[in-house]
Image: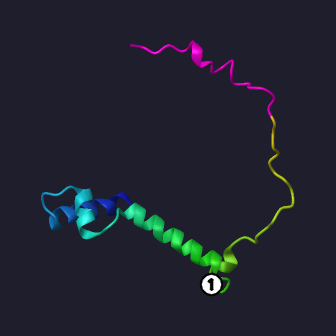
Amino acid sequence: MRELEHVQKKAMSIICPGRSYNEALDIMNFKELAIHHDEICETLFDTIVNDNNHRLYKLLPATYETTYLLRRTQTFKGDHRSKFYNLSNWKEEA
């Protein structure tokens, strides 16, 4: 991936001489290759997940809805942080 990004940087320096890489990308309305590839992967994955007839859909694991409450809510009595975060003991340095 780095080599491909290097080629794109070199091409941008030839196409837009005297401009930084990011300026050249903005002028040409391009994105960094890593960002572009991430967007393509997300789009493809969303397409596969949302289309039952997609040829790759069958490779996804079966969906499983659990009936268990995996996280329990905790109730704290009093302010247990006060002994650690007593702001009155902090002094501002001048």
What residue does disc 1 label?
Answer: 55
* Quarter location, residue 9: bottom left
Q: Residue furthest left?
A: 18
85 relative to 5 in the view: left or right: right
In the image, what residue type sits under mark 1? Arg
Residue span colored magenta: 76-94
Which residue is at the front of the view, 26 or 7? 26
Image point 68% across, 21% down: which residue? 82
Image point 34% across, 65% down: which residue? 31
Q: Residues within 10 Å of mark 1 (few under 14, many from 20)?
A: few
33 w.r.t. 58: above or below: above
Q: Position of residue 37 (x, y in %)?
A: 44, 67
20 relative to 69 in the view: left or right: left
Q: Residue furthest right?
A: 67
32 relative to 91 in the view: left or right: left
* Quarter location, residue 73: top right
87 relative to 78 in the view: left or right: left
Which residue is at the front of the view, 21 or 83? 83
Q: Position of residue 80 (x, y in %)?
A: 74, 24
SS state under label 1: loop
Q: Position of residue 28 (x, y in %)?
A: 25, 69
Judged by its main secondary structure, the magenta piece is loop
Image point 80% across, 48% down: which residue? 71
Image point 28% across, 59% down: which residue? 6
30 w.r.t. 20: above or below: below
